Structure formats: structure tokens, C-alpha cells
């Protein structure tokens, strides 16, 4: 029996994880559930899964969480605040941690799980984008395993050879691997040119054609920044240089990623666009379990198409490659600036096309520095956010 902490239980990844867990009550138990501010949703999940601990990130909401849990007849420990989230990730109440908190807010809890030697299922790509070397060092020191949950990286994990880095990571350069190919749906604006994107609204940007995701990630998919963050994540996870990572637009979202070998072979992982496939694989690894996903019927599918991304129109992907090549903390600066810019777009105060402009300006203003420790990295993250906010203020 694996005891699973689901950090970000009320989000899309959290909900899919709990669906898989519920299908295998003899294998998995949700022992820790956390949420940001969604008290009622967290209580509903606790009523179903009966965890040992429920954590709400906002301390002001802890009394309400306690009240609603009592009213629902749920008996479990209750905690709140950033420190409680971090402690929950390292708690003996769990041996497996699903890191599904969106954005930089998930960094410290993810690192805590790694240091504690947990079986870490990484859905918070921002953690490894910001602090890739630190996270991999923590996994190695803790002696646990790091399994990617992003569908693209989980696909690569499945297609790569068994040669491993400390922490259980497949290593590009072993086993005759030549190239990693990440697929992208192209988002809701595939084929658009820049003039067509001038008046895009948040509602339009959040209507992904294939996947159901949160608003921030949906906007990142629309700008292709999400794919850029995934490129940086692949670099860290699989020790792959930028020139060995390629992005292909694949609108059907059935081929989730490919691995090219030196002998000319290309292995691909296919499946319906349902995150439960990757989650079930990561939860049960190295075994496989039923995920509740419909079988892929290739005969009934439309023809599979592939095309290169348009880096002139969707500049965020090009900026991500730029940050990766710059090295150091440039990916963390990229992520911080993007989070601020996307929040402004969702609030209606920044045009869609200007998201890339803000990110580019922050990268130009703050040259990359070496990643030394979490304290200096968080300080640089704050610097990038303040620079982005200043750029936004000056633009108004």
C-alpha cells in the first residue's frame, strides 16, 4: 500500500490523481491532501478519501476548514500555511508525493519531498525549471525517485533506455540516444499570425482544444511558453543539451513525445489525451495499472500530422530556448516574469502578445547568474517579479 500526498488536490492534476487512486484502493491511499484556498472543494475530497492530514495554504482559512470538516464528519489533522505544506511533503504520513501545486509556490514543498526520499511524482514543472540542479541534488541525497507526470516527459521516461542517474532518472547520452522530441498541440491559436492575436481574450486563450487544464497553464499552452518550460524540464530530467531537444507541433495530441536513437530508430509513446495515463504510470512504476482511460483506436483517429512551431509568432518558446542556453538562473527569471505577465493578461491589463515582451525585457535586464542555493534563487525570483511589475506599470 502506497500512502500518497497530493499537493494541489483541488486542481486538474490532483483530481485526476485521486481518480486513479480511487480505482485501486488495495494499492494506493490518499493520506495527505492540500489546497490553496478552496476550502469547500478540499472538504469534499476529504469526505471521500479520508486522509490523515488536510492542509490549506492560506492560514486565515484554517478555522473554516476545521469547521467544515467537523460538519462533514471527517476526522483528520488540519494545518495551514507555507511551512505546513513543506512539512506535509516530508511527513512520515506519506511515502509518495504528487507535486501538483501550480507555479513557483510549489518549489519548497517539492524540494522537501525530494530531500525526504519520497517517491516524487513531479507535475509542478516550475520547480525543476527554477531549481533543476538543486532538485536533482535533493533527489540524489534523499535516495528517492523522481518520476515526471507531465505527459510529454512521462512519455520520454517510458521511451528511454533503463540507464539511470542518481534518483532514478534516465540519462541522455547513455543507450544510444540522439534526440528528444517533445510534441505540442499548438494550443487554441495554432496557425494564427501575429495580427490575429492582437485582440485575444483570456476566455479564448483558456479554451484548449484537447486538454482540460487550469487557467495559467492554459495561457502558457496558448503562448507555447508551457512547451518552453517543458524543454527546460527535459534538459534537467534527462541531462539533454538544448541542441538535442526538439519541439514538433502535433495537433491531435496522441503522440506525447518521441526519442530518436543513433541507429535511426524513433520510439514514440501514444495514448488518448488524458492525464490519468501518465499519473497511473508514475504511481505504479515500474508496474502498470488500469487508469480509466479509453483504449486508443488508431483506425478511428484522424491522420496524425506534425509541423514545426512558429517561433516568430509564438515567441515565448524561443525565449525559453534562449534562457536554457544562457544557463544559470535564467530559466528561473523566465518563469517568474512569465507568471507575472500571465497574471496581468488574465486580469485584463496586458495584451496577449505583450506577455512575451515582458519576459524578454526581464531577461535583458537581469543577466543570468549561477544557481548557488535556494535562498539566492528565491531572491532572484523576487527581483524578476519586481522587474516585470515595473515594466507593466511603465507600460500603462
Image (cartoon, helix red, strand yellow):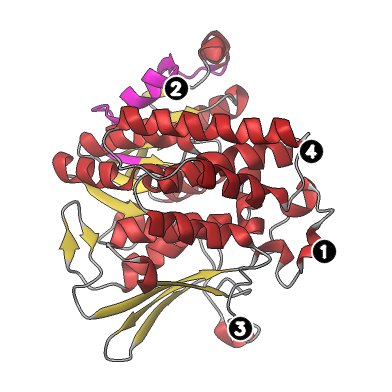
Residue for badge 3? 305
Please give the name of the residue rendered at 38% of the width and 72% of the height, measured from the top-left corner. Answer: 243
Front: mark 1 or 3: 1
Q: Earlier in the sequence, mark 4 or mark 1?
A: 1
Q: Quadrant for the C terminus, please.
A: top right
Q: Are marks 4 and 3 in contact (CB under 8 Å)?
A: no
For marks 2 and 1, give the CA distance.
45 Å
Q: Nearer the viewer, residue 372 or 64?
A: 372
Q: Secondary structure at mark 1?
A: helix
For marks 2 and 4, give the CA distance.
31 Å
Apparent side of residue 368 relative to residue 339 in the rendered image (left or right):
left
Give neighbour class at mark 4: few <14, some 14-19, many 20+ (Cα, 10 Å): few
Q: Position of residue 340 (x, y in %)?
A: 61, 37
Q: Position of residue 112 (x, y in %)?
A: 28, 32
Question: Exactly how many numbered labels are in the figure?
Answer: 4
Q: Are marks 2 and 3 in contact (CB under 8 Å)?
A: no
Front: mark 4 or 3: 4
Answer above or below: position of 175 versus 232: below
Say whether residue 84 is magenta.
yes
**Which of the labelled discs sits on residue 55, or is there none?**
2
Residue for badge 1? 195
Q: Secondary structure at mark 4?
A: loop
**Which of the labelled discs sits on residue 348, or is there none?**
4
Q: Nearer the viewer, residue 15 or 305?
A: 305
Q: Is residue 7 visible?
A: no
Front: mark 2 or 4: 4
For marks 1 and 3, give the CA distance.
25 Å
Q: Secondary structure at mark 3?
A: loop
Q: Quadrant for the N terminus, please.
A: top left
Q: Are marks 2 and 1 in contact (CB under 8 Å)?
A: no
Q: Range of the magenta residues?
A: 69-97
Q: Residue furthest bottom?
A: 264
Amino acid at each position: 500500500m502506497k500512502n500518497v500526498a497530493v499537493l494541489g488536490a483541488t486542481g486538474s492534476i490532483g483530481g485526476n490523481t485521486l481518480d486513479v487512486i480511487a480505482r485501486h484502493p488495495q494499492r494506493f491511499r490518499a493520506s495527505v491532501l492540500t489546497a490553496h484556498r478552496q476550502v469547500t472543494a478540499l472538504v469534499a475530497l476529504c469526505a471521500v478519501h479520508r486522509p490523515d492530514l488536510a492542509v490549506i495554504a492560506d492560514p486565515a482559512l484554517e478555522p473554516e476548514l476545521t469547521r467544515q470538516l467537523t460538519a462533514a464528519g471527517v476526522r483528520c489533522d488540519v494545518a495551514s500555511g507555507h511551512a505546513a505544506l513543506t512539512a506535509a511533503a516530508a511527513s512520515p504520513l506519506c511515502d509518495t508525493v504528487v507535486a501538483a501545486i501550480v507555479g513557483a509556490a510549489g518549489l519548497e514543498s517539492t524540494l522537501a519531498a525530494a530531500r525526504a526520499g519520497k517517491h516524487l511524482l513531479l507535475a509542478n514543472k516550475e520547480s525543476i525549471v527554477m531549481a533543476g540542479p538543486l532538485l536533482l541534488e535533493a533527489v540524489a541525497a534523499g535516495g528517492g525517485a523522481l518520476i515526471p507526470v507531465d505527459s510529454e516527459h512521462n512519455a520520454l521516461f517510458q521511451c528511454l533506455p533503463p540507464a539511470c542517474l542518481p534518483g532514478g532518472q534516465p540519462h541522455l547520452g547513455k543507450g544510444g540516444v540522439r534526440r528528444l522530441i517533445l510534441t505540442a498541440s499548438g494550443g487554441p491559436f495554432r496557425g494564427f499570425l501575429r495580427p490575429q492575436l492582437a485582440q485575444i481574450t483570456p476566455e479564448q486563450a483558456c479554451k484548449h482544444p484537447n486538454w482540460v487544464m487550469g487557467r495559467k497553464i492554459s495561457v502558457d499552452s496558448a503562448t507555447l511558453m508551457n512547451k518552453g518550460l517543458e524543454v527546460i524540464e527535459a534538459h534537467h530530467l534527462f541531462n539533454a543539451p538544448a541542441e538535442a531537444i526538439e519541439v514538433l507541433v502535433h495537433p491531435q495530441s496522441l503522440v506525447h513525445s518521441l526519442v530518436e536513437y543513433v541507429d535511426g530508430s524513433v520510439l514514440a509513446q501514444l495514448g488518448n489525451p488524458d492525464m490519468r495515463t501518465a499519473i497511473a504510470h508514475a504511481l505504479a512504476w515500474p508496474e502498470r495499472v488500469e487508469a480509466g482511460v479509453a483504449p486508443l483506436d488508431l483506425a478511428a483517429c484522424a491522420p496524425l500530422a506534425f509541423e514545426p512551431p512558429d517561433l516568430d509568432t509564438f515567441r515565448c518558446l524561443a525565449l525559453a530556448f534562449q534562457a536554457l542556453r544562457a544557463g544559470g538562473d535564467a530559466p528561473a527569471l523566465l518563469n517568474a516574469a512569465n507568471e507575472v505577465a500571465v497574471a496581468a493578461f488574465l486580469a485584463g491589463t496586458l495584451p496577449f502578445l505583450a506577455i512575451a515582451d515582458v519576459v524578454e525585457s526581464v531577461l535583458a535586464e537581469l543577466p543570468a547568474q549561477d544557481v548557488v542555493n535556494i535562498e539566492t534563487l528565491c531572491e532572484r525570483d523576487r527581483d524578476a517579479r519586481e522587474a516585470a511589475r515595473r515594466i507593466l506599470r511603465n507600460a500603462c
